[in-house]
Amino acid sequence: MANIKSAVKRIKTNEARRLHNKAIKSTMRTAVKKVEVAVNNQDAAEAKEALVAAVRKIDKAASKGIIHKNAANRHKSRLYKQVNSLNA
């Protein structure tokens, strides 16, 4: 454990931020999985609905710096590709 006051505070804030980031990333992954499940069930309407929610979560995570901007775009692109394959 750190002895310096600022280091103690840093440890506490780092842990709080880590848990916050973990929660946001977890909700993002859950939203992505909902899209993938809908695509696997061939449910186009549910997939489109879940896609909107997933894109919001992905963009939120990217704007907070939890995932990289390019990683967010890659995730969104892959999801859009899967959902659009249902319509074709």
Image (tube, helix red, strand yellow):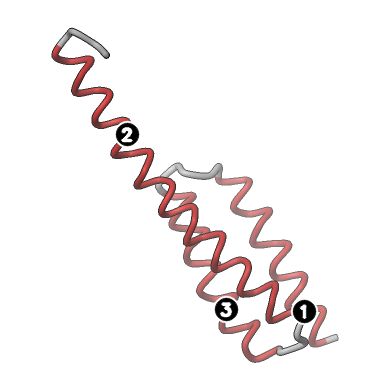
Dot placed on the residue nearer the N-terminal end, 2 or 3: 2
Q: Earlier in the sequence, mark 2 or mark 1?
A: 2
Mark 3 and mark 1: span between their CA atoms? 13 Å
Locate residue 2, reporting x and y percent.
24, 11
Q: Amino acid at mark 3?
A: Ala
Name the residue at 61% across, 74% down: 34
Q: Amino acid at mark 2?
A: Glu
Task: State which mark lies toward you, 3 or 1.
Answer: 1
The answer to whether residue 65 is left or right of residue 17 is right
In the rendered image, residue 51, in percent from the top left (x then y), is placed at: 60, 75
In the depicted structure, whether residue 55 falls above or below residue 41? above
Secondary element at image label 3 = helix
Residue 40 marker: 1
Sequence-wise, which precedes: disc 3 or disc 1? 1
Q: Furthest-left residue in view?
A: 5
Label 3 Cα neighbours within 10 Å, binned few <14 / some 14-19 / many ≥20: many
Q: Whole-percent x and y of residue 20? A: 35, 47
Quadrant in which the N terminus is drawn:
top left
The residue positioned 73% from the left and 62% from the top of the image is: 78
**Real-space Cα distance between discs 2 and 3?**
31 Å
Residue underneath mark 3: 50
Q: Which of these two is toward me, 69 or 49? A: 49
Residue corresponding to mark 2: 15
